[in-house]
Amino acid sequence: MTRNYIKTAFRSLLKNKGFTIINVLGLALGLATCLLIVFYVVDELSYDRFNTKADRIYRVNTDIKFGGNTSSYAIAPPPLAASLSNFPEVEKAVRLITCIGTRFKKGNENIIENQVAYADPGVFDVFTLPMIDGNPKNALTEPNTIVITERAALKYFNRTNVVGQYLFRVTENKNFKVTGVIRNMPAQSHFNFDYLLSMPSLATSRDNNWNNFSFSTYILFKPGVDYRNFEPKLNTLTRQHFGEANYAKMEKSGNYIRVNLTPLKDIHLLSNRQYELGSNSSITYVYIFSAIALFVLLIACINFMNLSTARSANRAREVGVRKVLGSSRKSLIAQFMSESIMVTLFATVIAVLTAWALLPLFNQMSGKELSISLSTLAWLFPSLIAIVLVVGVLAGSYPAFYLSGFQPIHVLKGKLSTGFKGSNFRSFLVILQFSISIFLIIGTLVIYNQLNYIQHKDLGFDRNRVLVIKNVSVLGNAKTLKNEIKRIPGIENATISGFLPTGSLRAPDAVFANKTPDPKSAMFTEVWPVDEDYLNTMGMSIEKGRNFSGQLKTDSSSMIINETAARMLGFYNDPLNKKLYSPEDHGGKTIVKEYTIIGVLKDFNFKSLRDNITPVVMKLADNNDALSVKIKAQNPTPFASKIEQAWNSLSPNQHFEYSFMDDDFDAAYKLEQRTGTLFLSFTTLAIIIACLGLFGLAAYAAEQRNREIGIRKVLGASVAAITTLLSKDFIKLVLISIVIAAPLAWWAMHQWLQGFAYRQNIQWWVVASAAFGSIIIAFITISFQSIKAAMANPVDSLKSE
């Protein structure tokens, strides 16, 4: 019997090739899209799960409120980890701190590396970082030692058995002994370092200052510990070290310092704090793309239902004859289900091949490294079988029950309702289909509108036409290069600085309004070492006071603060000549240095536009992290070669590396840009699938009304009138879809925009464009069949009458 069902189903599908092609193509596109999104979602949910102790690892966070400004940090004070060893719940506590821009020597070339961090010796006891050469027990216990990945070992030594070799660190002018080689960290890790320097090499790691928030601290709890019960103990520990009296004063004035924990598995998707070790994603996007996968699959299934029920007139007599000859309803349902599952099976095979072919392109758009491996096939193959059965039954259930329920007496007398108006449920499915498509169109437009707003917003500084040279610290005298570059015709200005406003952050420092460091008077801020040309090169504006001057020796003890810092310190109206005090390290000894405020800088966005502007303090100091060059010409690219010539004249053996500041700034929004690209791609596919169904429905509606169209043409109806007649019912359903989808899309995208401190409101034209576009798309799809039917010779449809 089963063999007969399959054979009959196969014949029926071959007999109706157009219907079969549309259904298979629609389902294949839907399933391929769904598969790609599933790969993406599975990858996002797998972050940090390679760690065998992941369920017991937690990161320490710090929330600080001061002067009405609340900040959430993914870092903690240096001495916290050592203090945690006194708690019986804690098995191990380790610290990491990034060391971006580290330069290592390879032959005569200095190579800048950004995947570098200092790590405590116990890092291998907490995280699963398999060591292929060396001993993890003592690999990072000694100063000036380093553990590197296989990738780094091959890069510098062309082999992996390199324990005992040395890497020369140009930044400190020291050799670091390689004491271990670990496997490359998985891409699904919230941090991914190729170089782990020993923490004893870092002087500030022994700092006992609880005001210094700079280290990423992780706790490995003993089995069975509930981290929520441990958080109050952390806050009690913090209060003790800040002093109960000082802490009470701080709370009385509405300020606080609170410590909390984030599970390791939640960091990538649920943590969006300042000073994260890597660029995290968001659970919101996982929900969004999961919903899109479901929507696209639903649209494909709706196509199947619609087209199957639309063909009811063609198969009604078949059902009637089968019933008269004794076929039961169960056998008819089985027959139609067989056809549905067969179509789904064909579509699934095509979908898998399509997804496999599109995977490289998808990786490029999403920034992923997805691949179909043996581990992937372990869950993919059973999932595909389940999809074939579930989608086949889901897509075929309504047509099967609908068609098998025909009464043979009505069918054979020709009383079956046919045509597009014959099914309210079919109309509901079309509305659902286009509501989803319009929802996705509005979402895509809002995302691109926000990205465009970010790219063109006035940030308070000019990031255009600024070329940034990355590794000027390798030069003996960076100021000489700066002066040489300033003499090049077409160069407007140049500056050497320790920080650039391109979205990445520094560890915060505590600056005090009183000479005696007191948490009550502390302001946690970023302190930037700059030179006298920094503000002019960056196009920043002084609101009050003056800029630094290289001619005034007293400016070495001066500071310029932004408006937010002035407000938080409480002297916005009269800030000039006020004193600030900053604890600084001098030869391993911490001294408190006094600074005088000489200027207030107009607020500018130096972080992501997801966050509000926070305090920043600038001081005049030598720092050779980067040399920024402002170029007069609108096209700065040709000047790169001239600047490189100046570089080579001073340091011919050093690698010249540069970027443009606007590109660096845009890189901070890669997640949104990729999301927008993916959203656009999936929306396009959803519209194509929906239009395939609409195309098929229009074809069958025209076919079922061909005699009516012939009579109308004989009576003088024009092609335009007949096209309008066939199109208006569909357009009416699209209009209803717009009314349903527009408010839902507005609400959903309004919620998404709340993640940005600076955002563009949803404009009326976004909804209007989506509505107009969907009507045009639907009309073009329908009109193709409508015009074809209207232009047909009426003799062909009436000759049998």
Image (tube, grey):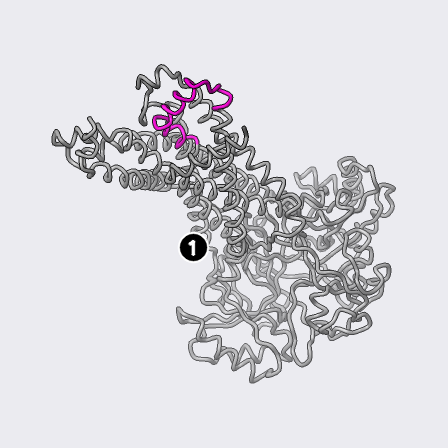
Q: Main secondary structure of the magenta part?
A: helix
Query: 494 above or below 5?
Result: below
Identity of the residue furthest to the top in this view: 409
In the image, the segment drawn in magenta is 305-332
Q: Is residue 137 visible?
A: yes
Residue at image coords 63%, 40%: 382
Residue at image coords 67%, 43%: 266
In front of the other: 306 or 438: 306
Quadrant of the image containing the C terminus: top left
Tally of marks? 1
- Lateral position of residue 120 relative to residue 44, left or right: right
Quadrant of the image containing the N terminus: top right
Residue at image coords 15%, 35%: 718
Q: Residue 32's spot in the image, x, y percent?
A: 51, 45
Q: Is residue 757 visible?
A: no
Residue at image coords 56%, 57%: 576
**Image-quadrant location for residue 785:** top left
Query: 523 above or below 249?
Result: below
Crowd around label 1: few <14 · some 14–19 · many ≥20 (10 Å): few
Q: Amino acid at mark 1?
A: His
**Image-quadrant location for residue 177:** bottom right
In front of the other: 640 or 66: 640
Identity of the residue furthest to the front in this view: 325
In front of the other: 696 or 158: 696
Q: Which residue is label 1 attached to?
A: 456
- Lateral position of residue 236 relative to residue 614, left or right: right
Q: Residue 286's spot in the image, x, y percent?
A: 57, 42
